[in-house]
């Protein structure tokens, strides 16, 4: 479980990428902006695509449920229906000038519908409730309630190679915002070690390198940067590697 030290806020760092097996959401992420160089900004900018991925997962859940299971487990169907409404509020928040109020609607519900927080309470144990944990974490990230974001993102379980990496990397961003650099460093490493993919691995390697250099982890930071250069030469982060290696080598000397 995460522990929080209440201190000042500071800016977060960068994200990562993959070269391995395909996941349920790989096609959704093909259009992501590879030039984003701050993970929190990248995630917020692409949350509509991320939620599209969640929708695909929800659809896949239903496709694997036979007619008999629909009858024996109506709770799962109800939960997915409620999840879709909460997701609608979230997506509206991304394009609205009243984003905070809409994020709160996504969390707490409105118009007679449950919010994400209601879903995890009323439909505990369902796949929709698990996805709601991810969505709650992202909503709290947008609201800059970083401790709450960490709490719910840590509850999110997934075999999806992209969503799990993003959730771990976002936890790292939240710890960074809370000035807990060691925890941020730990989670950035978890994020790129979760899998090896072209979408997130170089971004989280780069963020781990930046925050690692602040912690005096110079050797590891240079290794992370060299891995980006060697394994992900076409990534945005690759173009920043040499400058950062030079900076860290100056710190060592």
Image: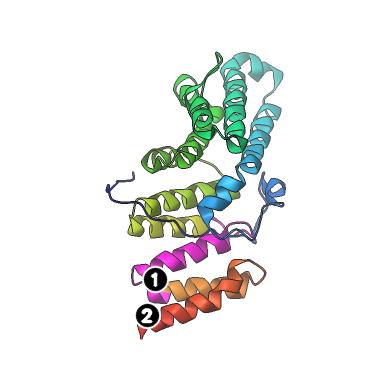
- Is 115 or 110 nearer to us in this picture? 110
Q: Which mark is residue 180?
A: none
Task: Identify the secondary structure beneath mark 2.
Answer: helix
- The residue singled out by tag 2 in the image is 251
Residue 124 in the image: above or below residue 232 = above
Q: Which residue is pictured at 59% across the width and 74% down the height? A: 229
* Furthest residue in direction bottom, as rendered: 253
Which quarter of the rendered picture does the C terminus lie within?
bottom left
Tag 2 and tag 1, C-beta contact below 8 Å? yes
Please check the rendered image and state whether residue 213 is part of the magenta-colored stretch, yes or no: yes
CA neighbours of label 1 inside 10 A, class few (<14), some (14 to 19), many (20+): many
Task: Identify the secondary structure beneath mark 1.
Answer: helix
Which quarter of the rendered picture does the N terminus lie within?
top left
Q: From the top left corner, tell me how far across and down residue 169 is, in percent.
A: 48, 52
238 displayed left or right of 168: right
Q: From the top left corner, tell me how far across and down residue 173 is, in percent.
A: 44, 52
Q: Quadrant of residue 215?
A: bottom left
- The residue singled out by tag 1 in the image is 213
Q: Which residue is pictured at 59% across the width and 18% down the height? A: 78
Q: Which residue is pictured at 59% across the width and 38% down the height? A: 94
- Is 177 or 182 nearer to us in this picture? 177
Please check the rendered image and state whether residue 125 is part of the magenta-colored stretch, yes or no: no
Give the CA distance from mark 2 to mark 1: 8 Å
214 displayed left or right of 58: left
The stretch of residues the image draws in magenta is 194-219
Q: Which residue is pictured at 46% across the width and 42% down the height? A: 141
């Amino acid at each position: 479980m995460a522990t929080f030290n209440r201190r000042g806020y500071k800016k977060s760092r960068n994200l990562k990428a993959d070269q391995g097996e395909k996941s349920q959401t790989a096609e959704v992420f093909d259009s992501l902006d590879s030039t984003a160089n701050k993970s929190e900004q990248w995630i917020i900018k692409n949350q509509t695509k991320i939620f599209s991925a969640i929708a695909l997962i929800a659809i896949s859940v239903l496709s694997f449920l036979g007619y008999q299971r629909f009858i024996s487990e109506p709770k799962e169907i109800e939960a997915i229906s409620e999840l879709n409404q909460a997701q609608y509020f979230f997506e509206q928040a991304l394009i609205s000038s009243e984003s905070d109020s809409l994020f709160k609607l996504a969390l707490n519900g409105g118009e007679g519908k449950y919010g994400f927080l209601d879903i995890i309470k009323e439909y505990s144990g369902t796949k929709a409730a698990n996805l709601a944990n991810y969505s709650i974490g992202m909503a709290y990230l947008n609201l800059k309630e970083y401790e709450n974001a960490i709490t719910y993102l840590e509850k999110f379980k997934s075999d999806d190679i992209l969503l799990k990496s993003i959730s771990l990397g976002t936890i790292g961003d939240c710890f960074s915002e809370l000035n807990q650099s060691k925890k941020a460093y730990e989670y950035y490493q978890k994020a790129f070690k979760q899998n090896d993919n072209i979408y997130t691995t170089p971004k989280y390697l780069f963020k781990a390198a930046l925050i690692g250099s602040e912690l005096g982890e110079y050797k590891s930071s240079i290794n992370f940067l060299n891995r980006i250069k060697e394994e992900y030469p076409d990534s945005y982060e690759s173009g920043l590697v040499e400058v950062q290696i030079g900076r860290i080598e100056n710190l060592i000397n």
